[in-house]
Image: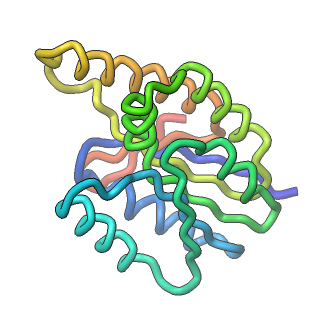
Amino acid sequence: MIRHSLFVLGGARSGKSGYAQSRAEAVAGRHIFVATAQAHDDEMRERITRHRADRDARWRTVEAPLDLAAAIGEASQPKAVLVVDCLTFWLSNLMFAGADIETAVRQLCVAIDRFEGHLILVANEVGLGIVPDNALARRFRDEAGRANQAVAQAVAEVQIIFAGLPQRLK
């Protein structure tokens, strides 16, 4: 059975998505893109359209703004090449939905552990900047930091991207 899991971290516009996609496209198999972003405004709709245009016909897109663990579980098979982009949007969706984030992250880690095939997850590293000036932003930063730690422990490989340059952490 082929199993590999990769977590790609980095700042905004660091090259995370492109790196994840290129790593996925280097693997033969059934390519699935799991999108977590929701198009609540024109700018986000344009961003989603650009990301879709970057993927060719071999990719199938699955939208999973909330139940990410289930989407990963449903796609699990030895020939699957799955990219989840991104955990940061997923986390913000959970927060706005009032979901139990700790449970959702735990379920995500179980899905990562059980996944058969190649799994690549993308997230922003939000903890390198200044301390946010409001409680919601501080909570988001803290939840993202805890989620990133849990996912980094659950995967086989972790890369961080700075200015388009990958650096192996694990």
Relative to 63, residue 142 above or below = above
Residue at position x 53%, y 86% from top? 57
Relative to 29, residue 74 above or below = above
* Horizontal side of residue 122 vs 75, given as left or right: left
Give the tally of numbered discs.
0
Residue at position x 25%, y 19% from top? 136
Q: Where's residue 19, x and y in %?
A: 41, 60
* Horizontal side of residue 134 vs 9, given as left or right: left
Residue at position x 59%, y 45% from top? 68
Residue at position x 71%, y 74% from top? 29
Question: Which quadrant is the C terminus positioned in?
Answer: top right
Q: Nearer the viewer, residue 164 or 78?
A: 78
Q: Quadrant of residue 81?
A: bottom right
Q: Residue extending furthest bottom?
A: 57
Q: Quadrant of residue 128?
A: top left
Relative to 39, residue 91 above or below = above
Relative to 87, residue 19 above or below = below
Q: Nearer the viewer, residue 158 or 68?
A: 68
Q: Where's residue 31, x and y in %?
A: 62, 71
Q: Where's residue 92, x and y in %?
A: 37, 35
Q: Nearer the viewer, residue 80 or 61?
A: 61
Question: Which quadrant is the N terminus positioned in?
Answer: bottom right
* Horizontal side of residue 50 vs 153, given as left or right: left
